[in-house]
Amino acid sequence: MSTLEIRDLHVSVETPEGAKQILRGVDLSVSSGQTHAIMGPNGSGKSTLAYSIAGHPKYEVTSGEVLLDGEDVLAMTVDERARAGLFLAMQYPVEVAGVTVSNFLRTAKTAIDGKAPALRQWVGDVRTAMENLRMDPVFAERNVNEGFSGGEKKRHEILQMELLSPKFAVLDETDSGLDVDALRVVSEGVNRVKSTTDVGVLLITHYTRILNYITPDFVHVFVDGRVAEQGGPELAERLEAEGYDRYLVGSN
Amino acid sequence: MSTTTTETTDNTGLSTDHSRAVADGAHTHGQGTVPEKSRGDRATSFALADFPLPTGREEDWRFSPVGRFQGLFGGVLTGVAPQVEITGDPAVTIERVGHDDPRLGAAGAPGDRLAATAWESFAEALVITVPSNHVMTGETLVTITGTDTPPAAQHILIVAESLSEGVVVLDHRGSAELAQTVEIQVEDGASLRVVSVQDWDAGAVHASSHRAVIGRDATLRHVVITLGGDVVRITPEAAFTAPGGEVEMNGLYFADAGQHQEHRLFVDHAVPNCRSRVTYKGALQGDGAHSVWIGDVLIRKEAEGTDTYELNRNLVLTDGARADSVPNLEIETGEIEGAGHASATGRFDDEQLFYLRSRGIPEAAARRLVVRGFFAEMISKIGVQSVQDRLLAAIDAELDIVMGQLIGTDDLDEADVIAAVESGVVK
């Protein structure tokens, strides 16, 4: 049983016009096995939260804490955070020329586990995970994210989540750019990891449609860098019907 | 630049007369200090006296640190050439011949001051011949070891006789100030791979003119790998003498602080239906690391059906390094299969680094993964396993210079991760 705690998190980002405050005091606590949906309009700070947890250098934490089982995540390097059990499925995964998916996955697995995986077991695990995500085996020999379609990139992110078995996974708009079939396949992947491990999930999304496939335990509505409202799955249904307008009016 | 074109040998069977280049009448020739309009107009000569001392303002010297070549600029060089040791297929003949051997000079005249210096200075040439119809087993390895003697010249001629297949590796080590010529003749229907590795110690100054002629339906695969030395300037030139020829010129370089690595290529399409591919990739790191890539391709009026593409990519890993890259494509006929070029110089991508590190991969291993990935396709083009292995080790050692302080300080045994990186990129 693990806990990811975010306390009064303030984050700014460097812009040509100077530092811009994005997160203005976020409090959030996620336990193993829970799924929290983070919803909100564009520009409300959802992705900033995701990248701040992962440690992207562009985002500066000006105050607050992120604790993983009491350990100070903000003091860790990007790769230390991943090895501590955090995973970020990115909205825009990066191409790495000349590095095959298979080599990348094995290198990451070795880094996360601190030792090379037993080869036979590993090859089988990769093959099964790829089959489950309806990925062609030749995919493994392609270069990381090079020439991938939007759907392939997202499947590849969830493939990593399955194989790296994080304690907590932050899924940053994993549903964006997916057609209905791809959305289902990717959602099934997330649900598989949820059912076979004790992963806690922070599901960041603008739209409610992915919540038809992945049922959240909690829904948090982000507005202007803060949690404006939170509740159970019924809150998502209300957003589906009403949109974000009432929060935006309220914040003006 | 002088426009004098001097023919000092009559045994070449090749003309250094470039009058054909004016056949289209669309351009004038350089006169006096006016630079030549076409790469094909550049004067070549076997006479050192025809090349004035470069000042650094000339087109073909403007990227070079002329001052660092002073040891080779003085005139005819008298130092002892680096030691040569040869191993490999016993069917390949190895000869040491005098300057007057009629086979020498057949691949064309020198195109710059240092190439002419190399031609006038060498006492004895090494001739490596793959006999007609012979298919080599393994490679002929020529180890050239500099012993820090006064500035010297060296001449090597590699001949692949008709319908032969072979691989010759020139491996430069130690330290030297060397003006060198490597002549390459690929006769009709032959297939030759030449790999030149510049793995000099610090202090080496190396100028080398590679001049290749490719016969009917012949193939040359030419690979240049430059890692060591202070100043290295290599000018590979390839000319087709009959239709159906193919040349693939690949290069890979890694420049560290203070190193100057220059590669100037010229592919001369003067006959129809030949194909050329030029691909050079380099990484740079550290203060004053400087790479220069010039890729000249000339498709003459006669060269219908030409298919050519040249590409240069540079990866700048740290501040303070500089990559110059100039592709030049001249096309004098529209009747070609294809002609293209591309050049790109990019910085190490922090988003790539973030992506890999967000998967737990420590920074040192992540950088290794990216740089190995950058070079991966080139490494597989080398075609000689021992050189590929050595190169991978050299790249890792280069990266360790910058990343050394990070190795072993992480909270895991990095050896396993690095082993995973190493086992995967090139198989």
Image: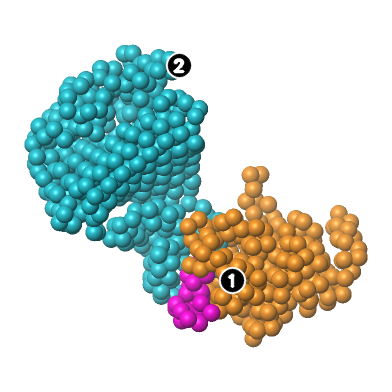
Chain colours: A orange, B cyan
Q: Is residue A250 above or below residue B102?
A: below
Instruction: Check residue A221 in the rendering and tell me which mark sits there, or answer none.
Output: none
Q: Distance of mark 1 from mark 2, alpha carbons?
A: 59 Å
Q: Secondary structure at mark 2?
A: loop
**In the shown orientation, is residue B124 left or right of residue A4?**
left
Picture residue at 63% right of the left edge, 62% below the top: A153
Instruction: Check residue A160 in the rendering and tell me which mark sits there, or answer none.
Output: 1
Q: Amino acid at mark 2?
A: Ala
Picture residue at 76% right of the left edge, 74% below the top: A214
The numbered mark 1 sits on a residue in which chain? A
| Quadrant in the rendering for residue B261 | top left
**In the shown orientation, is residue A236 left or right of residue A151?**
right
Q: Position of residue B359 (x, y in %)?
A: 54, 68
Local packing at callout 1 (Cα closer than 10 Å; few below 14, some 14-19, many 20+) is: many
Q: Position of residue B200 (x, y in %)?
A: 23, 49
Q: Characterize the magenta stretch by its predominant secondary structure.
A: helix
Q: Secondary structure at mark 1?
A: helix
Region of the chain picked out in magenta, as a range: A104-124
Q: Position of residue B392 (x, y in %)?
A: 34, 60
The numbered mark 2 sits on a residue in which chain? B
Q: Is residue B35 above or below residue B209?
A: above
Picture residue at 19% right of the left edge, 41% below the top: B157
Identify the residue under disc 2.
B26
Figure quadrant of the C terminus of chain A: bottom right
Picture residue at 83% right of the left edge, 75% below the top: A233
Q: For the residues carrying marks 1 and 2, which lies nearer the camera in this image?
A: 2
Local packing at callout 2 (Cα closer than 10 Å; few below 14, some 14-19, many 20+) is: few
| Quadrant in the rendering for residue A198 | bottom right
Callouts 1 and 2 in the same chain? no
* A132 or B287: nearer the viewer: A132
Is B6 colored magenta in this rendering? no
Q: Position of residue A240 (x, y in %)?
A: 87, 66
